[in-house]
Amino acid sequence: MREYLKFYIGGQWVDPATPKTLDVINPATEGVAGRISMGSAADVDRAVKAARAAFETFSKTSIAERIALLERCIDEYKKRYADMAAAISEEMGAPAALSQKAQAAMGVGHLQAALAVLKEYKFDEQRGTTRIVKEPIGVCGLITPWNWPVNQIACKVAPALAVGCTMVLKPSEIAPFSAQVWAEVMHAAGVPAGVFNLVNGDGPTVGAAIAGHPGVDMVSFTGSTRAGIEVARNAAPTVKRVHQELGGKSPNIVLPDLDADGFKKAVTGGVRGVMQNSGQSCNAPTRMLVPNSRMNEAVAIAKQVAEATTVGAPDSGAAIGPVVSATQWDKIQTLINRGIEEGAPLVAGGPGKPAGLDTGYYVKPTVLGPVRNDAIVAREEIFGPVLVLIGYDTIDEAVAIANDTLYGLAAYVSGADLDSARAVAARLRAGQVNLNGAATDLMAPFGGYKQSGNGREWGDHAFAEFLETKAVLGYAPKSA
């Protein structure tokens, strides 16, 4: 059993100000996998002071020094890659293959992306007699979720390090093991004392203390829209920058010009996109929009794919594992049942656990449809392996339905004619639009419109979140 009872503050592993522990539950077994200490405002204050002291020197390091630091972080991460993948499977139930090939891979991927950007990034420019300089914003509070744990840590820490910021990280208390491994990587890489600090704890205590601390210059939060609102409220009195990557209910428009094979491929890919990671992805394509004239075809394909999606323990070779907690399982079951009660036809899956999986927070791969876009299951982010099918008659109607949501994180379009798909993408109110199953691009900005948040992560756009802009007038003499 893992025991992580110290926090990483000022380059050292230290005891919490007040002893208090939390059991971490393995969602595949429902047993205790480990214990962590739960922090307090006093621990946050100590970490912020360490970060503030370190900022005085780290903010003045050269680009070459920070390039070397990121290279060391990458080397140390690769040494711990297997440990990271194992930690993620244990803490949040991801299948071993997903942890190894996707979850853990995102950690090194974001470090490598930040390194590539840093090598080319322009931190200053001359405009006439004025010098415009981009400087590190200061001490950054980073609050991360449990669903893609190291991905969300890396896509915040890597650019913050790259531009010269210092930071205090609060990972999810539900899935804290990967954050521990990450902190050990930072230490082994020689990140200067106080530059990276880790305090475990819950949102109402540690998260609120970070967001409200006057010594924190910006807070970057990933999680639910509800929690993001609370972070913004807590940050408001100190007028700090708040970056938020929040929820989603992403539309997936399957266009009518696809032939039978293309249609099958698009629907199949859409179902699998929802089921991956047990549906616990904020950008999952959870609303599939298909022509009404082809709804029966879509239902048949979706049913087949969902029923063929295997569910099991992380080491079983199954396609998906459990969801992260009993609370999450209960929420998903409630929404599936409400959808059925409202009249949503059940295509596949449904309430309860899959056969033979009585222990563990397993959910049946579920498809509901056709449903109206005002149905509860089409409006709320379920955050489980649940897809809804929605019909449309015209492209204009499909676009209107797609945009009829509080969210705007991602959208998906599949079509035979690329120009038509591009035209639809141009009309969608979402921060990222995927055409025809395009691969992940770690240099593409990631973030949302509307209640899916503000600001952008990944690649060069992430740097802007951690920089202030200074204009120095009269920097250069006037020309004669």
Image: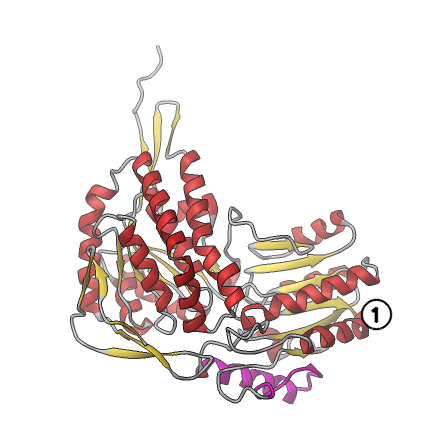
What amino acid type is highlighted by mark number 1?
A: Ser
Residue at x 34%, y 63% (from the top left corner):
179
Residue 171 placed where, x, y %?
Answer: 35, 65
Instruction: Return the x and y of residue 13 as percentages of the image width and height.
Output: 20, 62
- In the image, is residue 395 part of the stretch drawn in magenta? no
**Residue at coordinates 26% horizontally, 66% vertically from top-left?**
209
Does dot 1 land on a helix, a strand or a loop? Answer: helix
**Viewer-closest of 274 and 139:** 274
Which residue has dot 1 on it?
293
Foreground of the two, 468 or 176: 176
Q: In which quarter of the image is the N terminus?
A: bottom left
Image: 444 above or below 390: above
Q: Is 336 included in the stretch rendered in magenta? A: yes
Residue 45 location, quadrant: bottom left
Quarter holding residue 86 = bottom left
Residue shown at the point (63%, 63%) measured from the top left: 403
On-image quarter of the C terminus: top left
Q: In this view, does 431 lie above or below 369?
A: above
Which residues are drawn in magenta? 327-355
Left or right of residue 474, residue 420 in this image = right
Residue 404 in view in this figure? no
